Amino acid sequence: MNARLEAEVEIRNIAVFAELAVWEKRPDLQVLCVAARGHGALEEDVFETVLPGLSRRARANLLRHLRYIQLVDRNGVLTALGRRCASSGEAPAREQGVYRLLVAFHPLFESYVLDFKRTPGDRRDRDYSNHEQLPSWFSPNHNRVFTSIFQDKRFNIAKFPAQRGQSPVCRVEEMTTGNLQWDIDLGSGSNKWTIEGQVSGDWGRRGKFRSSPESVEPSKLVDFCADWEPQWDEQVGRLAIAYDGKVGQGGRESFLRSRSYKNKQVRDFGPFDTVEVRDIPVGPATKGDARTWATAILVAQAEAEDIYMDPDAYQSEWSDIIEDTPLAKWAGDAPDPSVLSEVNGRLLAARTRWLLSAGADLGMEA
Amino acid sequence: MKPLYFTACVHPKRARAVANQAHGSLWPYTAYLKSALDAARKRESRSVRWEPVPREYPLRLTPMDSLLVMEAEGFWYRLEGWSDDVPDMPLFVGEQYRPIVPKRVERVPSGLLLVLDSEVDPDEQVFWKGSPCTLTPTDPIWPDTLVARRRDGTVAHLYQRPEQADRIFLVIKGCDHVVLEDKHGAELPHQVADPHEGATCLRVGREKIPWNGQRDLTLEKLPDQGFFIADNGVRWAWSEDEGGNRRRRGVWIQLLPPEEVDSEAALDIRTAYMEEGVREVRTRRGNNRNDAFEVFNFRRDNYQLELERLPAEESTLFIPSSISNLQRQRQAIFSLRDSPLPHHQALLRLCEAPNRVRWPRCQPESVSRWYLLGDEHWSGTIQQREFVEKALGTPDFAFLEGPPGSGKTHAICELVLQFIDQGLNVLLCSTTHVAVDNVLERLVGKFEQVEAVRIGLADRVDQTIRDVQIDERIAALTETWRSAGVFADRDDDFNLERVAEATILSSVNLTCGTSTGILAHPYIRRLSHRRENDTGPRWPYFDVLIIDEASKTTFQEFLVPAQLASKWIVVGDVRQLPPFSEPKDLEASIAEVSDENEAKLSDAHQVALLILFRLQRPEAGFRRVRWLIEEGDDVLNALCAEIEVRVTHSDRMPEIVRVVQGNPTDNEVSITDIEAGQPVALHLLAADWILFPPELRDRVAPYLPPDGLALRDWDLDSARAFQFARWLDRRGSFSKPIWEQRRQFRAARELASRQRDFLREESWAKQVSWRLGRVHQLACARDDGQRERRQDEIDSLMPAVDPYSKWVPQAIDAIRDVGVRSAIESFRIGRSDRRVRCRSALTEAIPQDVWKERAVILEFQHRMHPDISRLPRDQFYEGVALRDANTLDERDKRDGWSFALRAPARRVWTDVRGHDERGINQAEIEAMRRWLVAWRDYAESHQRTDGKYWTVACLSFYNRQELGTRNMLRQLTGKARAETRFALPNTTIACATVDRFQGREADFVLLSLRNTSRPGHMDSPNRLNVGITRARFLLVVFGHRKYFAEDCPSEELNALADATPLFELGSVR
């Protein structure tokens, strides 16, 4: 069972003074982070093994540098950023200045920076009046690493420096929208979301973009289906429905259904314009539904096979239809074929009735 | 986005004002750099001739022996006449009967030899076993027999070097580890020394090569035998150094001096080729790759270049204009003006209006442990400490002003160590390699906490600290990594060198380079990849910038590294030479002078101002001859407008008449009226200057007075030409000659020709620019006359008509500030004139109270003999600095100086009545030669006590004289190819101009003044100060004594001549 949730998200072009780090290839720091992962913490004596040729002071300075860029903590233990460095081989290189940031907003991720542009000061720009407070939902988090949609670069934002006692200010230059797509495997909780859209103006020639996939902690997605369907039976992991007449040709039945919903609020993850859930396990809501459902399958199979059923075959077919299916609990015994004239309000054709009941009738004649 | 930058830097309420102020304060810099860039793009350096250098053999030396040093322990005394047994009890010393147990007692023929732990004062009484005795200090006595035993027990061959007072060197044949024993097998304490310690030369056969221990050596031929023997006894094997893969080898060429050298030049034009920014030379203009030659390396001392291949024979070389330095400076100014970062707050404070700016307090930070300044009884230590504490505590700037030899480098070293203790990352920059390397030499390898990298070409870096040069460090680290298999699994595009570079830069705490060389730093290179006006985000990689020799660094040069730091320590001396500014840059900026709205002073107006300035001067025969001025209408309009405005203020304006085509106004005559014979034509006869445009020349010519001198070369019809020529010939000579400088004009023809040449060759901008330079050079001169004259001339070159009069003078002064003032001068000394458009600390200086909190002046000098320092102390430092330090006491004895002790003083004058012929005063060079011969005789038998070579410098204020001196030195030393470095027994000699020698010193300086009838640029107090403060033991001035003492208009030069006793060479011998 998986779901695709879609929402239109606001994308803002925010110019702000920020301290940002662009991740660049640092194989030397990578080997140190790998070593730190292996040893539990990075100590100076590890250096000689993985990065020989440095003096004692150089090793101490390098360790201090790793702390400074927050790849290891005060005790030399790898941080989240350090783990990232160990696996990607990239490390942050800090810089400060005004950036134009392409920021998407949605409660799913609060703010997500799609791209950054370094922006010089323009000597002709003397407009001090069009500054506004930075939106409250846009706060820096040095642990969050973004991937630029138009450049092959990773980056994170450490802070928005401002004068003491002052809040950071920004210029919101233009707005557009993008489409958020969130695909969730509702079974395992694994999920990924991306933002697609098109940026106008001078941002980039390749106006269309799709962000790198991001995900939400799977554990946060438990019982997700019950939010949308009150009939969801968590115990059996199935949605109880009235028979919907959707038995396929030949009587094929997967007991899976897709549902779509409009304008759903998804827990803390915000509103979504559409939610499409595919392969929802379903089963009958009542005994009657179960019998109707099973009968409909039986009829469809008989019509597809187009052979006469003797009473044993009829009983065996019924058993096969309900066994190990959501119908088993309530379907009961097979209906009497001689009185079976309609299923779910549909009158059976004479030939169908004959196919189902002929065996019995002929037996009686014998 | 500029407002967002400023809002992050300063309080939002002040952001707009600060931004506007920064824009105004930095405007002169941007304007200047724009013009300089335009000029540089058009300009190419003067070409130079060259010749190939014979092949050289780079050798790598490896020691074949090891060197041990044994140091004497304790204090050695003889106890004469003691015949009793050695008492088993301490000696009792002094009134307190202090017990001293001898460390060692030996019986010698005359008594006993005692080694004590502590010193015994000669006046103290000594008792041993109840008997009074007399201890006589004596030199240590070394064991008769020493045995060097290898680990395997075998005995190594050992021989001793002559003993020094308190230590003995021992050479062990082979490089084995040994234990040193006496004849009884007792182990003797010793240390392993560097195998080159104490060595000053290498011998191979009969040849002796001066040597300071470097492992790389370049010779013109391979040695005949397989090893050298250093004069400390260690043998050195040599092998040809192929340089490995990391070093490209090219061909060396010798740049030759130009055939015609400007006799007034203070620097050799070849110096321009010896800069790190020079990556290519060309033989022809254009883009043909075949005419371009990549520069691998250079040798500044010899003016040699290593090129990728040999240029065509007989070709000349020039440097394609390099604008990257100027671009970096401009980018740095733009960055501060448009995109300052929060750590630039203090730099912005320099740009703020003096009445608005608030400087934070500077609280000195006390130091708990001194590394180099531990002993405060040395003169100047207290001040050096004060500076270090201020620099540690300052939130923004600290300043150290230090006269020559005052211990600036020492203080910088201590400061670096203190910053490193605080975990800070330090960037050290200076104008010269020597200054940077001096600091590194004192720190690297001596303080383990210093992890340094030197940015700059490997061959420019002093041998002793070559290991920290960035390429060498990268090579060493990659070699280690390769042999250890680090990164061995990476693919082919993995660039190990780049990784090593990043590792090194992240692991150092001291980065050093020259102001030019530091531009090659990867962090600055990153910025240089951006467009010039891309002043976007960057990062303060360094916590602190220490800029040494800030008196030779302009503010815009300072700003390039400064933007990468968040605290700035500025070290320099405003009384030494200012930054070298390319005269063409200054000239170009003046020619392009514009106001903030980019309105320019038109070319026509500049021509008009030049004509007006020139023809008004007596040397152009003002009011003695009549000038016919044929110029375009725009020039004539400007000229008339200027005269009209000035005539009300000055009675020295010419009577003019302008011939026009249409209706005449005041001072104008219509050509048709003239042709019609109207009486107004008589105005032509009354005018000093007759003005007309080229298109009227043929029409007006028949009516011009025949005594007019044309400012342009005329090609009139033959009859008219004959008329004027005849007059010129008939008029013949003036009754009273017209003088220009030392040249006299008796004939009108010569005078006219001279003025025509002048106007053809000169420009208004050039005339203004050299006067600006002179005014600045003379800023500290005691006699204001010269400076005021030049300033008056500048004023009269300024436009008087509106709107130019409102902004041109201010803009010109601003250009002067930018082009010739140093960073420290801008911070320290406010501009004295009133013409400042946008006031800030850059024009008014940092306020006195702020300066005092952050600055220290080092008052003591440790270099010069007191006789030498006295004059500069009184003349240039008003007696408050350059006081003699106690480190100079007994220095003669310590270093073994005994040359010319009969001289009446250590600064003496050798009177030479020579004369300057084409820039060379040969008589002075000959007098210098005689002194050097005497020195050679002396030095042959008198080594320095510390075993190092004596240093001698032959200095002059002029490049031409330097070349003459060089030729003499080539003959004297037999080094026919040497350029600036020569050798005599136990002596190295440097030949340089004073400008080039700033920042260096020598034991013995011979200073040639060359000029005999004018001061030239020696009247610049700063230049003279540098010239006479280079000598440690002896300064000999060569010059025309009478002229400098009596006739020279410079008070400083008069004082030099008056206060320097005469001493002739005969008395040396």
Image (cartoon, coloured by chain):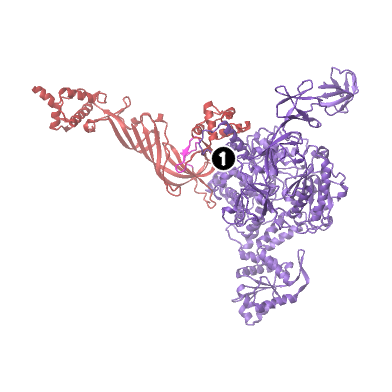
Chain colours: A red, B purple
- In the rendered image, residue B452, in percent from the top left (x then y), is placed at 64, 37
The chain holding disc 1 is A
Q: In this view, does A58 lie to the left or right of B755?
A: left
The residue carrying mark 1 is: A164
* Residue B354 visible in image: no
- In the rendered image, residue A179, in percent from the top left (x then y), is placed at 38, 41
- In the rendered image, residue B1031, in percent from the top left (x then y), is placed at 78, 45
* Residue B92 visible in image: yes
**Which quadrant would residue B852 be assigned to in this image?**
top right
- In the rendered image, residue B824, in percent from the top left (x then y), is placed at 68, 47
Q: Does the magenta stretch include residue A57?
A: no
| Position above or below: A323 against A95 | above
Q: Which amino acid does label 1 sit on?
A: Arg
The image shows a total of numbered marks equal to: 1
Q: Which residue corresponds to the image point at 62% horizontal and 66% vertical from the top-left?
A: B604
Identify the magenta region: A134-151
Q: Is mark 1 on a helix, strand or loop?
A: loop
Q: How would you classify the magenta stretch by its main secondary structure? A: loop
